[in-house]
Each structure stands twice: as structure tokens, then as C-alpha cells.
Amino acid sequence: AIYLAKKNIKRKGVLEEYEKEHYNMLNQKINYKWDFVIMQAKEQYKAGKERKKEDRYALDCQERAYWLVNRAPPGMLDALEYGLDRVTDPNENKVNQIMYYQQAILKTRVKSSVSLGG
């Protein structure tokens, strides 16, 4: 909630559509704490402005990467389903199909009339 509130402050209300939905949903769910969330986001935004440009950029990239991994936007692969530590690969099925068809193309074929001796 704080991340989205801070992003909303930084971009002056211009969020992606899915981010707006999450922002409004969180506002409804934690309405009793929303003033605290906004206050915390403003404080973090002010503290970020006081940092050096390099530090601010590094922290912004880290935070964005964290949220892309943990709350992937719609249409992107979820890293929690297909993580680095998991054996599951989202493209494994396609790779197996491609290998099967490549092997099928390379196999030599013999006419059935020739193989039967007729």
C-alpha cells in the first residue's frame, strides 16, 4: 500500500490501470489505516529526495524489482510460480514439442511397399 501511495504521489496520480485497481482495493480494505499509509508514503518520498541521486536511483530500482517479482503485472509470468529455485520452466513443454518435431523430420522413412518386400 505504501509503495503504491508513494508511486501515486511521485507520478501525481498517473498509475497503470491494474495499479489503480490495487490502490483502490487497498484503500477499501485498510481504510482505517489509510491516513497512516499516506503519511508514511509522503515521509518516504521526502526522505528519498534528500538522498544522493545514485542512492535514490538504486533504491528505486530495488523497490521496483521487488514488486515486479512479488506482484507481477497482468500478462507477465509470476516469479513465484516459475521461480529460479523451482524446477518448473514455463517454456519446457514448448521446447519438448520442438525437439520432438525436429527429430521426426530428421528420421529416415522407408516406403511400406519396399519394406514388405513387395
Image (tube, grey):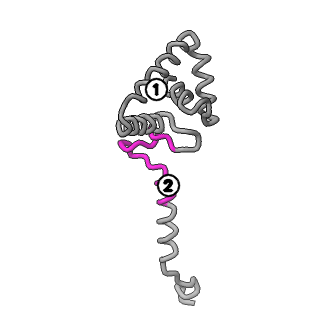
Please report the bounds of the magenta region as a residue range: 77-96
Looking at the image, tell me whether mark 2 or mark 1 is earlier in sequence order. Answer: 1
Q: Which residue is mark 2?
A: 93
Q: Which residue is mark 1?
A: 45
| Residue depicted at 44% across the width and 24% down the height | 46
| Residue depicted at 56% across the width and 84% down the height | 111
Q: Callout 1: 10 Å neighbours few (<14), some, many (20+)? A: some
Q: Position of residue 15 (x, y in %)?
A: 60, 34
The image quadrant of residue 56 is top left
Q: Is residue 46 one of those drawn in magenta?
A: no
Q: Position of residue 38 (x, y in %)?
A: 53, 18
Q: Position of residue 26 (x, y in %)?
A: 57, 21
- By secondary structure, the bulk of the magenta-drawn segment is best described as loop
Amino acid at the residue labelled 1: Tyr
Image position of 3 with respect to 83: above or below: above
Which dot, 2 or 1, sits closer to the camera? Answer: 1
Can you say which quadrant of the picture contains the C terminus? bottom right
Query: CB atoms at circles 2 and 1 under 8 Å apart?
Result: no
| Residue depicted at 55% across the width and 27% down the height | 9
Of 75 and 93, nearer the camera is 75
The image quadrant of residue 112 is bottom right
Element carrying mark 2: helix
Image position of 90 with respect to 12: above or below: below
Q: Along the horizontal axis of the image, is 2 left or right of 57?
A: right
Of 19 and 42, nearer the camera is 42
Amino acid at the residue labelled 2: Asn
